[in-house]
Image (tube, rainbow, N blue to C red):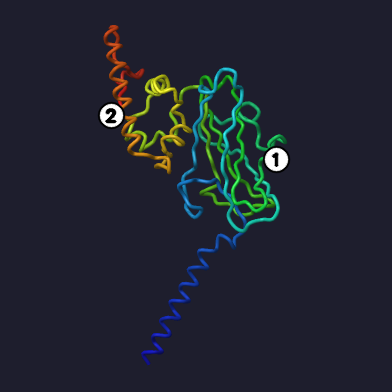
Amino acid sequence: MKNKILTYLILAVIIATLSACEKSLEVYDAGNGLIFYDEVASYETAVDTITISYSFIYAGSAVTQDTIWVDVETIGNLSDVDRTISIEQIETTGTNAVAGTHYIAFDDVSLAPYYVVEAGQTMASIPVVLLRDASLKTEDVTLLMQIQKNDDFTLTRPDRNTLKIIYSDQIAQPTNWAFYATYIFGDYGPVKHQWLIDTTGNKWDYDYLYDELGFTETGYNSNYDPAYLTYLEEYLTRKLAEYNTERTNQGLDVLMEEDGTIVSFD
């Protein structure tokens, strides 16, 4: 009798395990899909809309357009043929970017060769071409992108199919100057930002914070180096003290934001 009970228990565990496996594979059974890639999250994870900030201010006066490369990742089976990526703009709050004025439309024929996941691949990088319109001198615009269903990708993940780019032609706070960056370097301010650019020769934009310092919007990536960041914070604190001493000797106030907040790394 005990052997029979043990056998039933083992069968129950096996059936439960198989059921759990079937549930975990439901996403594959639902069809082939496409999501925006996030380095921190796995494809199963729901994330907030990925947000990228950009400013033409760093590009030089001769630059009239620039390209941001965005990664997408497939869900489901590999394909032995190339698959087309379909992207559309959707309206959002704030000033929405205008195709032809602020960016090259996603369905422009010049971009078609790039909006493809190649055969046998699970990822692709697609270009978003931003245009330097005069309006960006005085306002930020937002381009909210959404992956669309098509003949090749029939599955959508509403929690992973949008990406937002906020850009201007002004100094702007990078979206990844968030929790970890604030903890190391203090609150963001445009005067501080310009001083950092002038002092280090780096842009201190989204790419620099992400690629060199390891800051993401919600945490940090593999480039994050606590020892180096501690050194950098100490170095900048020392340089700022020297700079303020020079200003004081000239009869000037220490470095402040426009609202009177003293620039510091506290």
Taking 104 as reference, is 116 above or below it? below
Taking 121 as reference, is 69 above or below it? above
Taking 20 as reference, is 126 above or below it? above
The residue positioned 58% from the left and 61% from the top of the image is: 28
SS of the residue under disc 1: helix
Where is residue 17? Give x, y as percent. 46, 72
Disc 2 to disc 1, how far (Cα)? Answer: 48 Å
Q: Quadrant of the C terminus?
A: top left
Where is residue 220? Give x, y as percent. 40, 42
Mark 2 closeness class: few <14, some 14–19, many ≥20 residues within 10 Å = few
Residue farthest toward the bottom in the current orientation of the protein: 1
Amino acid marked by disc 2: Asp
SS of the residue under disc 2: loop
> Which residue occupies the foreground of this view, 110 or 50?
110
> Which residue occupies the foreground of this view, 1 or 259?
1
Taking 212 as reference, is 122 above or below it? below
Residue farthest toward the top in the current orientation of the protein: 250
Name the residue that disc number 1 marks. 113
Q: Quadrant of the N terminus?
A: bottom left
Q: Earlier in the sequence, mark 2 or mark 1?
A: 1
> Which residue occupies the foreground of this view, 219 or 165?
219
The residue positioned 46% from the left and 23% from the top of the image is: 171
The residue positioned 46% from the left and 26% from the top of the image is: 203
Name the residue that disc number 2 marks. 266
Where is residue 211? Give x, y as percent. 46, 36
Amino acid marked by disc 1: Pro
Where is residue 58? Give x, y as percent. 51, 23
Query: Is residue 213 shown left or right of residue 74?
Result: left
Query: Residue 233 occupies which quadrant of the picture?
Result: top left
